[in-house]
Amino acid sequence: MQPSPPPTELVPSERAVVLLSCVLSALGSGLLVATHALWPDLRSRARRLLLFLSLADLLSAASYFYGVLQDFAGPSWDCVLQGALSTFANTSSFFWTVAIALYLYLSIVRAARGPLTDRLLWAFHVVSWGVPLVITVAAVALKKIGYDASDVSVGWCWIDLEAKDHVLWMLLTGKLWEMLAYVLLPLLYLLVRKHINRAHTALSEYRPILSEEHRLPRHSSTADKKLVLIPLIFIGLRVWSTVRFVLTLCGSPAVQTPVLVVLHGIGNTFQGGANCIMFVLCTRAIRTRLFSLSCCCCSSQPPTKSPAGTPKAPAPSKPGEFQESQGTPGELPST
């Protein structure tokens, strides 16, 4: 491999953009966790998997934020700590993203139910937390994590480029799983969408006699759009880090191109924000509840007092007003 170019130094505007991406991702991941805690009726198995993905993305955004803020100029103990945390969280995020796609495939296409799905969830935990932990501990113990001159990162630390087998450890601590996700995610979501389309075709001859058939195209259209967008967003965010990884292996000076560096910084840090947009802001049931909650918080005021000092009784509510304000308890989010 050719000698490493000088370290990539972020200008203030580039650092501000990447830091903002970290903050938005952390807020998005936190909002996903908050909605899971607030509304128990929304805790489906798929959303539980999304919860664990959000926890991994939250840790990833926090560790990247510290790395970009420090903009390491050489090896140090906090460089190793930050590199270890981001390696674990980022790799775990890859595994949980694929786990969600695999769960949807097995539950929709293969109709997996009951004890099988419970065992599947335990297997996801063992693989998605255990494998990244083992890899990270091994990398730290063998002193593979350290300063990388920001050639394959954006200010944060990852694999030490001075290590003789640094390419192998770059693959083991992220790039191998990232490239596998590029293949598995589109494949699994394509199979799910084909199955849904076949089911809709088989059902089409019965639609004229179904009640409320106008809801079917709307819900299926929303689900189809999300099934297409999930792998596209993942690849669109992560591909820039892969490009810089390849350029680093080739020794190309293009690895320090400012636009490429910023895209890499946003792509690696904004996964939590993208998931929040997809599964909170673009999910009608959760969006409606968040809007109602914010309205209640804004309109809550202390009771007004009459001139005599006694609080006024609230105005009687109209019939049906309480029921309307509660929403629909059984409403579940779309896919």
Image (cartoon, rainbow, N blue to C red):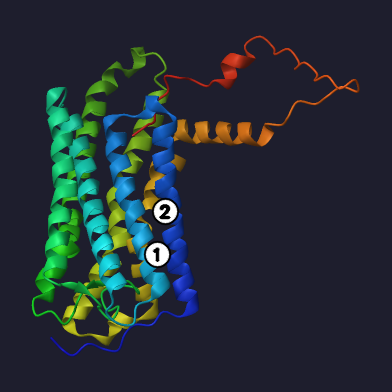
Total numbered labels placed on residues in the image: 2
Residue at 62 percent across and 11 percent down: it is: 320
The percent position of residue 15, horizontal first and vertical second, equals 45, 73
The percent position of residue 4, horizontal first and vertical second, equals 22, 87
**Horizontally, is 210 left or right of 304 in the view?**
left
Residue at 35 percent across and 64 percent down: it is: 64
The percent position of residue 112, horizontal first and vertical second, equals 14, 27
Q: Are marks 1 and 2 in contact (CB under 8 Å)?
A: yes
Between 13 and 101, the residue placed more toward the observer is 13
Q: CA distance from mark 1 to mark 2?
A: 10 Å
Between 89 and 207, the residue placed more toward the observer is 89
Q: Farthest residue in the right direction?
A: 307
Kindly tell me whether residue 240 is visible in this rendering. Answer: yes
Q: Which residue is mark 1?
A: 65
**Horizontally, is 311 left or right of 191 in the view?**
right
Q: Amino acid at mark 1?
A: Phe
Mark 2 neighbour class, 10 Å CA radius: few under 14, some 14 to 19, many 20 or more: many
Q: Amino acid at mark 2?
A: Ala
Q: Identify the secondary structure beneath mark 1.
A: helix
The answer to which quarter of the image holds residue 43 is top left
The percent position of residue 25, horizontal first and vertical second, equals 41, 55
Kindly tell me whether residue 176 is visible in this rendering. Answer: no
Q: Which residue is mark 2?
A: 26
Q: Is residue 8 above or below residue 58?
A: below
Residue at 39 percent across and 66 percent down: it is: 66
Q: Which of the two discs, 1 and 2, labels the residue nearer the N terminus?
A: 2
Q: Identify the secondary structure beneath mark 2.
A: helix
